[in-house]
């Protein structure tokens, strides 16, 4: 079946640095991918919709200059957290829309900013 | 605004007992409802979507537009059903992201 893979699974970075998280659709092409973040014991919150070849659409309250999204190919979207701060520490999850509009989720990436 | 409410954070039932996980939504348009399941240390997996009206692993869910609900039911719980369950609301034929409820942690006791 369709698989979405995220890398890295977990990352620790220093405050003020930038970190990139990759989301790949392994056996299908995804023109649309979605990025979510999940704080402990809370639900997934949609951050942005990533469209191949065009600018991402950000949800209200999400800083586009802080969370840079690039969807340069039909199988890869990246989320870069720029100038990370401890409050950016969270679980980031991507999903991709496949055939029949079925949404497939990645395994998530834990970001800890120290 | 879209909203999904799962009133129970935790639901514990005995093996063999019926299970019902509640989900209510708020949406002005024509909703697409989903149930996702997350087993321990695994990724989110699609369990059900209201459009397909199918039964997966014995679970069913019926969209009740009058009550704006999409409760998940299973007549006889099994231990392997223990997991986190999320109700989600979509729109735009899959073009838009999903709005998730806060999730219900289902524990099946032996």
Image (spheres, rainbow, N blue to C red):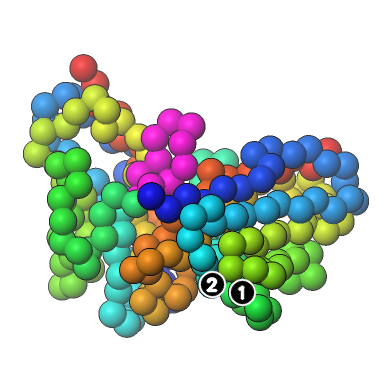
What residue lies at 40% left-to-right and 41% top-to-bottom? B38
What residue lies at 75% left-to-right and 49% top-to-bottom? A87
Is residue A84 left or right of B46 when viewed as pictured? right
Among the two numbered marks 2 and 1 on one chain, the one whose residue lies closer to the N terminus = 2
Q: Residue furthest front?
A: A27
Whole-percent x, y for residue A69 in the image: 70, 67
Asked if the stretch drawn in magenta spans residue B72, the answer is: no
What residue lies at 83% left-to-right and 41% top-to-bottom? A13
Q: Is mark 1 on a helix, strand or loop?
A: loop
Residue, disc 1: A52
- Does residue B64 lie above or below B42 as drawn? below
Q: Closest to the observer: B110 or A52?
A: A52
Residue A57 found in image quarter: bottom right
Q: Residue A31 carries which label?
A: 2
Residues at marks 2 and 1 on the same chain: yes
Q: Residues within 10 Å of mark 2 (few under 14, many from 20)?
A: some
- Residue under mark 2: which chain is it in? A
Disc 2 to disc 1, C-alpha distance: 5 Å
- Residue under mark 1: which chain is it in? A
Is residue B108 left or right of A69 when viewed as pictured? left
Whole-percent x, y for residue B86 in the image: 37, 50
What residue lies at 61% left-to-right and 74% top-to-bottom? A52
């Amino acid at each position: 079946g369709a698989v979405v893979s995220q890398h890295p699974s977990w990352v620790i970075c220093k405050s003020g640095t930038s970190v990139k998280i990759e989301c790949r659709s392994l056996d299908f092409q995804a023109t649309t991918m979605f990025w979510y973040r999940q704080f402990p014991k809370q639900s997934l919150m949609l951050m942005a919709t990533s469209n191949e070849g065009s600018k991402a659409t950000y949800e209200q309250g999400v800083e586009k200059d802080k969370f840079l999204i690039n969807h340069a190919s039909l199988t890869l979207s990246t989320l870069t957290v720029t100038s990370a701060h401890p409050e950016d520490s969270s679980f980031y999850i991507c999903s991709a829309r496949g055939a029949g509009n079925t949404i497939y989720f990645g395994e998530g990436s834990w970001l800890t900013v120290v | 605004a879209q909203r999904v409410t799962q009133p129970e954070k935790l639901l514990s039932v005995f093996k063999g007992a019926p299970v019902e996980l509640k989900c209510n939504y708020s949406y002005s348009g024509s909703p697409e409802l989903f149930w996702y399941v997350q087993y321990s240390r695994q990724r989110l997996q699609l369990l059900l979507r209201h459009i397909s009206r199918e039964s997966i692993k014995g679970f069913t869910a019926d969209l009740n537009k009058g009550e704006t609900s999409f409760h998940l039911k299973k007549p006889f719980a099994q231990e392997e059903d223990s997991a986190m369950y999320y109700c989600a609301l979509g729109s735009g034929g899959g073009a838009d992201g999903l709005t998730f409820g806060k999730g219900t942690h289902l524990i099946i006791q032996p």
